[in-house]
Every structure is written in C-alpha cells, then in structure tokens.
C-alpha cells in the first residue's frame, strides 16, 4: 500500500470496511443461530466471530462519525477501560 490516497478515498475505504463488517456480523449471527441446536460449540464460535465484526464496525463507525456510535454501558469503554478518558 504505497499509493497516496486523498481524504475522500480514505473515507470511502473506511465506509466500505464498516459495511463489510456489518454484513459479516449478520452472516455469523445467522450461522450461530442455525447451529445452536445441533452444534453448540460451533455456535459459540460463530457468536464470538459476530461480536468481533460488531466491534470492528463500531470502531469504523466512530471514525466516520465521532460521537454517533452508541457505547454499551457494560462494554467497559470510557474512563473505566484502561484508564482512558473519552474526549469529545
């Protein structure tokens, strides 16, 4: 990746990544739901993967629109997570 890109192209790439992560989250959640009755271990793994994509999509959404991403109160973000403060 030695190509220089402008801010608009960078924003397009971030949005594309966010949209892909959101779609992958949906796919893994559906897979987890379909595996729950037959293979609980693989269903748990699929749920973990869905959660990973959810976090990635959330981070990218925060980059695109700071402050618009809803933070789960139990998620450990803000001053409680690693001593970091939220700056607005």
Image (cartoon, rainbow, N blue to C red):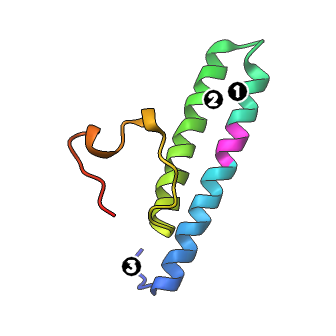
Q: Which residues are magenta?
A: 24-28
Whichever of callouts 1 and 2 sits on the residue coming sooner in the sequence is: 1
Of circles 3 and 2, the one toward us is 2
Residue 54 lies, in percent from the top left, at 56, 44
* Residue nearer the viewer, 83 or 55: 83
The residue carrying mark 2 is 46
For the residues bearing labels 1 and 2, Cβ distance under 8 angstroms? yes
27 drawn magenta: yes
Left or right relative to 83: residue 18: right
Query: Distance of mark 1 from mark 2, alpha carbons?
Result: 5 Å
Q: Quadrant of residue 47?
A: top right
Query: Distance of mark 3 from mark 1, alpha carbons?
Result: 38 Å
Q: Secondary structure at mark 3?
A: loop
Residue 46 lies, in percent from the top left, at 63, 29
| Residue 32: assigned label | 1
Residue 80 lies, in percent from the top left, at 27, 38
Whichever of callouts 3 and 2 sits on the residue coming sooner in the sequence is: 3
Quadrant into which the N terminus falls: bottom left
């Amino acid at each position: 990746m030695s190509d220089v890109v402008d801010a608009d192209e960078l924003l397009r790439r971030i949005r594309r990544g966010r949209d892909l992560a959101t779609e992958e989250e949906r796919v893994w959640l559906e897979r987890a739901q379909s595996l729950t009755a037959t293979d609980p271990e693989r269903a748990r793994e699929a749920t973990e993967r869905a959660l990973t994509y959810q976090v990635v999509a959330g981070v990218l959404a925060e980059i695109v629109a700071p402050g618009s991403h809803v933070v789960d109160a139990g998620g450990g973000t803000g001053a409680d997570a690693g001593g970091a403060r939220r700056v607005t």
